[in-house]
Image: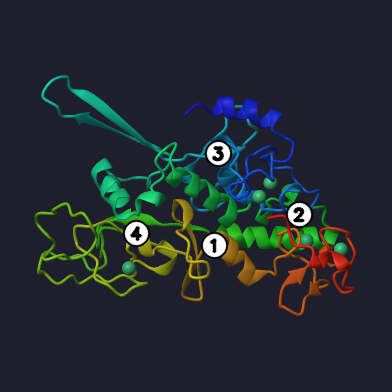
């Protein structure tokens, strides 16, 4: 991976990210993302930032690098050459080359995955991908790759952990945020893909791996889906979310923070709050639930319904509907007047 080009690009990309990106829902209304001064939304169509096409891979990788750099997953990041200690995400791309068997000219079919679970043999990584619905496989240039990058924007917004990306904070707010970010980076986890019984603490050597015994399946057979099928043998492993059996020869996901006695089917490794797949297996484990970054943060702090940033002051507006707002963000899109004195703009519907 060439980290130096990422550095050069970064100097250029100091303006709000994603300007001009096409809206994924509005056809004809929006000619490209134009950021509102403080809402994380487009002034043309009012859709959110993550409702527009993602910006660049490089930008995503820098954001993720920031998040993981001070966490215990720093090994998933790499130092940027000449970047003053800056680290970027070492995203694990996977390139599969399959010979196309035909009687005449043998050709090759190359598939690039924008992301694959790190640290796996390719065969296991492929089994993992096959368990995901096609629309969620991050194959370069497909819907699945777009889905992944939208999840990144949605689940791990950079302003949740980088104060420089949000609106100006007061000194007490900045202190509260610094403390929060410290905790956030301590809590972040990255799931591990393995065969059932095949994950566990690595540093301590091969001691006492959960559920592992001499009766391991001798001949792992590849299977098209993660179920037992008519294999007949009862699995001792069950998925934490759906309770269904996990085939001993099908990859599952482990979450270190939840303990290695728990495992998930790849499609069951989702946020308990939004139900979305946990992007790049980044998860939080809170009160016995798996959460994405966005929903972990919202259990800790209220999120402003206006600007989408977390609120680090006690002095905020709680709407009747339970939604939270920074006081000065509790206002109308059209006229900017406070929402507590209803304006006539409300009757006009959003141009969507
Ligand atoms: Zn739109
Ligand atoms: Zn737009
Ligand atoms: Zn399951
Ligand atoms: Zn979520
Ligand atoms: Zn706000
Ligand atoms: Zn108004």
Q: Residue furthest bottom?
A: 320
- Mark nearer the viewer, 2 or 4: 2
Instruction: Judge: label 2 CB < 8 Å from ligand 5.
Output: no
Give me the disc on residue 39: 2
Mark 2 vs mark 4, CA separation in Å: 34 Å
Callout 3: 10 Å neighbours few (<14), some, many (20+)?
A: many
The vertical placement of 28 against 157, above or below, is above
Callouts 1 and 2 close, C-beta under 8 Å: no
The vertical placement of 41 against 12, above or below, is below
Q: Residue furthest top?
A: 105
Mark 3 vs mark 4, CA separation in Å: 26 Å
Q: Quadrant of residue 87?
A: top right
Name the secondary structure under disc 1: helix
Callouts 3 and 4 close, C-beta under 8 Å: no
- Closer to the chain start, of discs 3 and 4, is 3
- Mark nearer the viewer, 3 or 2: 2
Reading the image, the residue beneath label 3 is: 88
Give me the disc on residue 187: 1
Going by the image, does 9 lie left or right of 239? right
Residue 326 makes an appearance in the image: no
Callouts 4 and 1 close, C-beta under 8 Å: no
Name the secondary structure under disc 3: strand
Mark 3 vs mark 1, CA separation in Å: 19 Å
Reading the image, the residue beneath label 4 is: 266
Callout 1: 10 Å neighbours few (<14), some, many (20+)?
A: some
Q: Quadrant of residue 332?
A: bottom right
């Amino acid at each position: 991976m060439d980290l130096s080009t990422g550095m050069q690009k970064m100097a250029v990309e100091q303006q709000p990210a994603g300007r001009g990106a096409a809206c994924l829902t509005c056809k004809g209304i929006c000619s490209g993302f134009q950021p509102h001064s403080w809402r994380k939304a487009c002034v043309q169509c009012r859709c959110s930032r993550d409702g527009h096409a993602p910006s660049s891979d490089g930008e995503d990788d820098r954001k993720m690098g920031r998040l993981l750099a001070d966490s215990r997953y720093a090994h998933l990041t790499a130092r940027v050459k000449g970047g003053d200690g800056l680290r970027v995400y070492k995203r694990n791309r996977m390139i599969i080359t399959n010979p196309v068997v035909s009687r005449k000219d043998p050709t090759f079919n190359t598939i690039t995955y924008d992301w694959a679970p790190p640290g796996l043999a390719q065969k296991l990584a492929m089994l993992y991908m096959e368990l995901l619905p096609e629309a969620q496989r991050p194959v370069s240039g497909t819907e699945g790759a777009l889905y992944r990058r939208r999840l990144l924007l949605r689940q791990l917004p950079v302003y949740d952990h980088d104060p420089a990306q949000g609106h100006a904070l007061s000194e007490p707010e900045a202190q509260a945020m610094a403390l929060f970010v410290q905790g956030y980076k301590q809590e972040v986890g990255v799931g591990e893909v393995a065969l059932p019984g095949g994950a566990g603490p690595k540093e301590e050597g091969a001691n006492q791996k959960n559920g592992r015994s001499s009766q391991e399946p001798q001949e792992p057979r590849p299977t098209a889906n993660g179920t037992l099928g008519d294999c007949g043998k009862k699995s001792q492993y069950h998925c934490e979310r759906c309770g269904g059996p996990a085939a001993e020869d099908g990859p599952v996901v482990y979450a270190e923070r939840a303990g290695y006695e728990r495992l998930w089917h790849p499609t069951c490794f989702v946020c308990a709050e939004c139900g979305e797949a946990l992007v790049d297996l980044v998860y939080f484990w809170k009160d016995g639930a798996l959460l994405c970054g966005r929903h972990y943060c919202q259990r800790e702090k209220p999120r402003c319904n206006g600007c989408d940033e977390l609120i680090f002051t006690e002095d905020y507006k709680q709407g009747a509907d339970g939604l939270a707002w920074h006081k000065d963000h509790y206002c109308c899109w059209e006229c900017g007047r406070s929402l507590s004195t209803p304006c006539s703009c409300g009757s006009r519907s959003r141009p969507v």
